[in-house]
Amino acid sequence: MLEKIKAYFPELTDVQVDRLVELESLVREWNEKINVISRKDTDNIFVHHILHSMAIAKVKQFKSDELVLDVGTGGGFPGIPLAIMFPETKFTLVDSIEKKIKVVKGISESLGLANVEAMKIRAELLPPKYDCIVSRAVTAFPDFVKMTRNVLNPKSTEHSIIYLKGGDFDDELKGMKNYSVTNISDFFGEEFFETKKIIYLNL
């Protein structure tokens, strides 16, 4: 794990790498108390959850003044790995399930992440102040855009939604404009990523 992080992201500091390594054990510990990821997936936390989340950093470098919203964060993905990678960027992680937010808060506190805020709330109820929305597929992409686009800051110079999704979703993108689709397998060699993609939509 340590070697893979350094190989895929050589620009990270030792502190960031240590936090990403610690994140795996924290997720495993919390998951024994509150089930936020599949029990059968606990041996694959790094690849399936942490590294998958980090793929976003291959297509987007977050700025220090950006406000980023992670919708349907679950156990803190992709928000927590990204918050570790971009410590000057403010991340708000939301989920409608209380126990998941409890886990996110516990992990963030253990890691000392001052740039993470976690809230139990439906994303569409948030004020329109965010520059970028990130998420791992929680619904069909057009439905997700419709649900969340109103929380983007109308005064921001760049509105974007970055969505991690697997499988074939070409039909979902018909009629949409200003988007790109990137294969995560372009960056990572693990078999898990063969069908995983990043949708990057500019609004």
Image (cartoon, grey):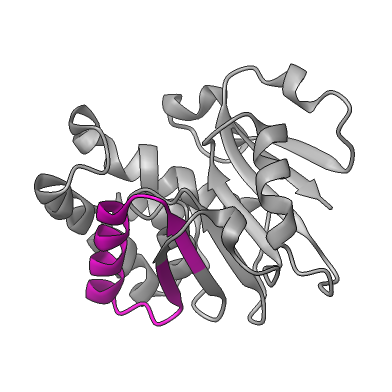
Q: Whole-percent x and y of residue 14?
A: 36, 74
Point out residue 165 in the picture as x, y percentages from the top left corner: 57, 32
Q: Nearer the viewer, residue 20 or 186?
A: 20
Image point (74%, 19%), residue name:
170
Q: Is residue 11 visible?
A: yes
Lateral position of residue 129 relative to residue 113, left or right: right
Instruction: Judge whether residue 114 is colored magenta.
Output: yes
Q: Name, please, the residue furthest toward the front.
A: 125
Query: Which residue is depicted at the point 50% across and 54% down?
Result: 122
Q: Residue at x 12, y 53 (%)?
A: 29
Above or below residue 3? Residue 199 is: above
The image position of residue 192, as x and y in percent, is 43, 27
Q: Which residues are magenta?
A: 92-118
- Is 122 rendered above or below residue 61? above
Horizontal relation, residue 127 to residue 21: left or right: right
Residue occupying image coordinates x 41% and y 51%:
96
Residue 21 in the image, given as x and y percentages of width and height: 27, 59
Q: Residue 162 lies in magenta, yes or no?
A: no
- Snapshot quadrant of residue 200: top right
| Residue 67 lies in quadrant | bottom right
**Left or right of 119 in this view: 156:** right
Above or below residue 74? Residue 42 is: above
Is 25 located above or below residue 155 in the figure? above
User: Does any portion of residue 57 appear in the rendered image?
Assistant: no
**Camera-side residue: 154 or 121?**
121
